[in-house]
Image: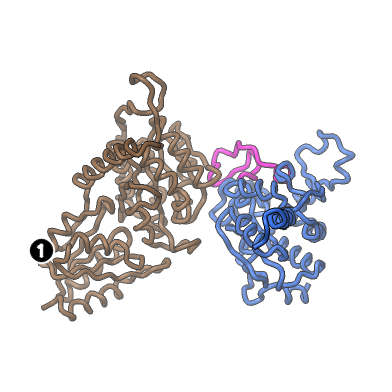
Chain colours: A brown, B blue
Amino acid sequence: MKGNEAIGEGAVRAGCRYFFGYPITPQSELTHYLAKRLPEVGRLYMQAESEVASINMVYGASGAGARVMTSSSGPGISLMQEGLSYLAGAQLPCVVVNMMRGGPGLGNIAPSQADYFQATKGGGHGDYHLIVLAPNSVQELVDIMKKAFDLADRYRNPVMVMADGIMAQMMEPVELDDQYQIEIQPKPWAATGKVDHEGKNLINSCYVIPEEMESLNFILRDKYSEINKNEQVCEEYQLDGADIVLVAFGTASRICRAVVEKARAQGIPVGMIRPISLWPFPADFIGTAANRVKCFLSVEMNMGQMVEDVRLSVCGKAPVYHYGRFGGMVPTVRDVLEEVKKIYSGGAGQ
Amino acid sequence: MQGKADKYLLKERLPHIWCPGCGNGIVLSAMVRAFDKLGCDQDSTVIVSGIGCSSRAAGYLDFNTLHTTHGRALAFATGIKLARPELMIFVLMGDGDSTAIGGNHLIHAARRNIDLNIIIFNNHIYGMTGGQCSPMTPQEHLATTAPYRNFDRPFDIAGLVQAAGATYVARSTTYHAALLTKLIKAGAEHKGFSVIEAISACPVSHGRRNKLGGGYEMLMWQKENAVPVEKARTMTPEEIKGKFIIGELHKSEAPEFTDMYGQLIEKAQREHGGE
């Protein structure tokens, strides 16, 4: 399946009932897929008049208790930031897919990882976090959609799935479960009429009195620290005996896997940590790894964003370097390997 | 055309990126002819475009141009006009650009009657992103996001902007290119918010999926279904049904926004002192 289609099928199998979106490259095939597929299973696809409308339609459907999603790419995701802040403030679950492209501004439609800050550090206004997941294969795109919807419901929080134009267009074989009956837990907080609960439910993020706002902030803070404790996920690759550890997610991690193999073949002890959850960032695992390696190289398709989280995780225990290509350019195995060799000969090998 | 093309087109940017059979080049050439007839001065004219196939046109024109965000070219153009009211401004937008994401900006710019000249390339589809429905896609048509056929009712752009306050509204097609040139010129000469809807064809993303033929057949469709406004006046609603009207659809006089603001400043200074 194509990456975009895999996300669509993953969403259908995760029990997504509603999709609201607006055309933008490189996620178009996802909307084409769902426009056809969702009505087949009795669910709804709608093209909104803008991304601003899409995200607020998501808010509405989520407030009514449904599994709902939207998708876009950088410029459209920027337009959704107001809505994401409101969704986080009202504690509404939903899934947002960002197929990142080169920026800033209109940029281009080539693959990029430049929206890392926007996704993991807020993007919208106010004190909040999204849960951010970054798969790196078409199979993982399918599987992560189920996880994304489950996390969203469990924590009543928006979840973003981040990939890029390469993963959107890439075709790989995919195994789909034959059985996919989803059991969705009841949502007694939802605006579904006064059937399942007593009194009236209010979906809201407006607290005029600061004390009341702060008490919501406390609830959110406790929730985020719970998520941070429970949901850090990463994959390690050839960390045994590694002096240099590459840290990369998504497309960059596929390149780094090849770099690790090539470097090892040349006798350079390189390993890789691949964050799968970008928020919460796998700080605990990286922090522990920092006790036994010589240095880290954060490889990203941006000017250096995740590298800041790697530094915070490493906490001064080892040097942390960055290598990036930007603006829709993709690093090559050779270029990253050169960078690894440069670091290795510069001291990491001694 | 050669002399006009030399003057107003950036030849080093050609050939353009539009697909074979696309009508956008015809709209662009109608614009160039209108610029020539207007005697447009490149130092006092600005072209603003949004995002989409149509908005590439700004990139081929040898003027100072702004290529802006999707749907919001009119907000940028409003900023330019307020900063430099003496400039002549053309705003190029597509149908999805102007009526979906930019719908709100469109009606408010019309309401202000600010002196901007809008050319909407209406090809009934999102071409650049791969043939999704736009608010101008006809009912019962197929699109990549309407695999079971579109049931949404399209906008009437002309009716919409007229109701919102536009003081010059016209429509032509890429088949009626001479009329299109004439209307673009008349719209530019009109003081106030003018909208020219240019019905264009997208054989690749719209025509092919709906078996409307290639560029030629789609031009012929425009020829056969367009009714000149003078003739439409003599026809019954039943006779016009399924067709569309071309020509000057609405023209009225109303105070223009930058003029009104100039008067406001004079008043404020008169009543409350100057600097």
In the image, residue B155 lies in the stretch drawn in magenta: yes
Most common SS among magenta residues: loop
**Position of residue A332 in the picture relative to residue B190 (left or right):** left
**Position of residue A320 in the picture relative to residue B143 (left or right):** left
Q: Considering the image in quadrants, where does the C terminus of chain A appear?
A: bottom left
Say which element carries label 1.
loop
Which of B268 and B194 lies nearest the eye of the viewer? B268
Q: Determine which quarter of the picture holds residue B42.
A: bottom right
| Outermost residue to the right | B234
| Outermost residue to the bottom | A345
Q: Residue at x 83, y 36 (%)?
A: B239
**Picture layout, residue A98 above or below residue A222:** below
Which of B248 and B42 lies nearest the eye of the viewer? B42
Q: Which residue is mark 1?
A: A291
- Pinpoint the chain carrying mark 1: A
Start-end of magenta stretch: B135-160
**Position of residue A168 in the picture relative to residue B251 (left or right):** left
Q: Is residue B109 visible?
A: yes
Q: Amino acid at mark 1?
A: Asn
